[in-house]
Amino acid sequence: MRRRGRSLRAKLVVSFVWVTVAGLVAVQVMTVVAGHQALLDKLSRGVESSRTLMVAYLDKVSESPQARPDSHNSAGNECATLLISPDGQLVRYYADNENGAHDVPTPALAQLRDMADSGRAQMLGGNSFIGAAGRLATGEYVVVAAPVIGYLQLWQDFSTMEGIVALVVLGVLILTILTITRRALRPLHSITVAAEHIAEGSLSQRVDEDESSAEFASLARSFNTMLQRLQDSFTRRREAEQRLREFVAAASHELRTPLTAISGYAQLALLGALDDPVEFRQAMRRVSSESDRMTSLVQEMLLLAELDQGRPLEYEVVDLALLCQNAVHDARAADHGRELTYSEANGPHLVGGDCQRLHQVVANLLANIRAHTPTGTPAQVRLCGEDGLHFIDIVDDGPGIPPEQRELVFERFFRGDRSRHDEHTKERSGMGSGLGLSIVAAIVHAHNGSVRVLPCIRGAWFRVALPALPADRFTDLASAEPGKRP
């Protein structure tokens, strides 16, 4: 099992702590080093200044060394003054025993000469004192020294206090960054929880976009959009799988009937039950009829499969007026006893699409009238245009479609109430395959149009709406190869 890494919040806090600690340590080190050096420089300037004053003072004194000033005339209350002979022997020691400056050791002769020649202060007595030396006119040396330990102890106390303050500041900053990161990363936590629910199969989770910062609000919106599209995709997939199962089941049922009839007549022929020529010819007619019906059903299912796969249609300029006129003529030839009229308005009616398939739309709707209305029932085909759309209305005076079935008639293998058919339509159509209107809807949708059943007082009213062909598209298509005409 792969080990889970640290959370983003933990990484941010740890990174912030490391950066803060590094910064505080750097500041602490620089403060200590710089402060210590500044303290030594101040002490050095002090003893050097006192040394200069003492040398000038002692050079002016005319008395003998024994008559030179005593301790109260030293260089200062915190300094000790040493008078040393040219050979390095201590001659006189001026100091206030109460200030801790009585322990200044006598420097070696070589160090005295170096100090006097350079004029710079140096550390004495194992870094406990800092002193500066000068040479008198008599050849003697004067050393002015001051204790360092007291100043260093003061600075150590200050550094300790500074470290404590730094730790307190670090603690406050850690608490602050914990609070800030918890609040700032709360939307990300919500997204993580939603993602975990999605992994468990729940696609209804959404992330609140209102309380987020601008960045997380944008991420939340994108995440919710992705969830919605993912949910819609799964929904469409389930619906497609359900339609496929229903389609396969219905197709199997529809194919079973003609196959059973053909198989039955074949068995009768093999058993010698069709010796009578009249019965044999009648059986063969039934076999041919069922074969034609099965062939038609298979062709319709193949057409629907092609439309479902989104295969590109032929695209050309189609004159709907000419198309409807030809379809009406074909329908009149197929049913002489029916009054079928055609009218149009607001022409011309030009669309872009597959002329053969659009002709099939009108032909199937007219065939639906022949199959589902009594013989002689009048019907109308009306063509008009409005608001960039062309409408093909096919209306009949038959028994009509119940309101609850108006949205179902375009489903595959759907059949309406058998009471709508008279004996003639039942015998003529055999109730149909149930795919005619499904093909109509599929073709129309492939042309970015719509088809629906409109309510009417009597009969059925089908309306097909197709987008009109823009003028620029008409120019482009008119110069192309002419399309087919029904």
Image (cartoon, grey):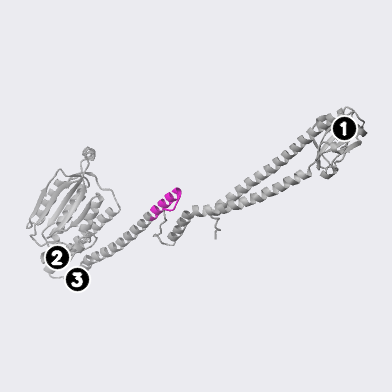
Amino acid type shown at disc 1: Tyr
What is the spatial separation of the Cα atoms under label 1 and label 2, in whole angstroms?
Answer: 137 Å
What is the spatial separation of the Cα atoms under label 1 and label 3, in whole angstroms?
Answer: 147 Å
Q: Nearer the viewer, residue 298 or 208?
A: 208
Q: Label 1, secondary structure: give it.
A: strand
- Residue at 86% from the left image edge and 30% from the top image edge: 58
Q: Nearer the viewer, mark 1 or mark 3?
A: 1
Give, as a single range, the part of the protein colored magenta.
Answer: 210-227
Q: Is residue 114 above or below residue 78?
A: above
**Residue 376 horizontal/vertical position (percent):** 7, 60
Amino acid type shown at disc 2: Arg
Q: Nearer the viewer, residue 271 or 438?
A: 438
What is the spatial separation of the Cα atoms under label 3 and label 2, in whole angstroms?
Answer: 35 Å
| Residue 11 appears anywhere in the view | no
Contact check, label 1 and label 3, Cβ < 8 Å: no
Return the residue at label 2.
420
> In this rendering, would 89 be left or right of 187?
right
**Residue 391 horizontal/vertical position (percent):** 17, 50
> In this rendering, would 141 be left or right of 485?
right
Hey, which quadrant is residue 425 in on the image? Answer: bottom left
Chain-order first, disc 3 or disc 2? 3
Return the residue at label 1.
141
Return the residue at label 3.
268
Q: Label 3, secondary structure: give it.
A: helix
**Residue 32 horizontal/vertical position (percent):** 70, 43
Q: Is residue 18 above or below residue 81?
A: below
| Residue 180 appears anywhere in the view | yes
> In this rendering, would 63 be left or right of 175?
right
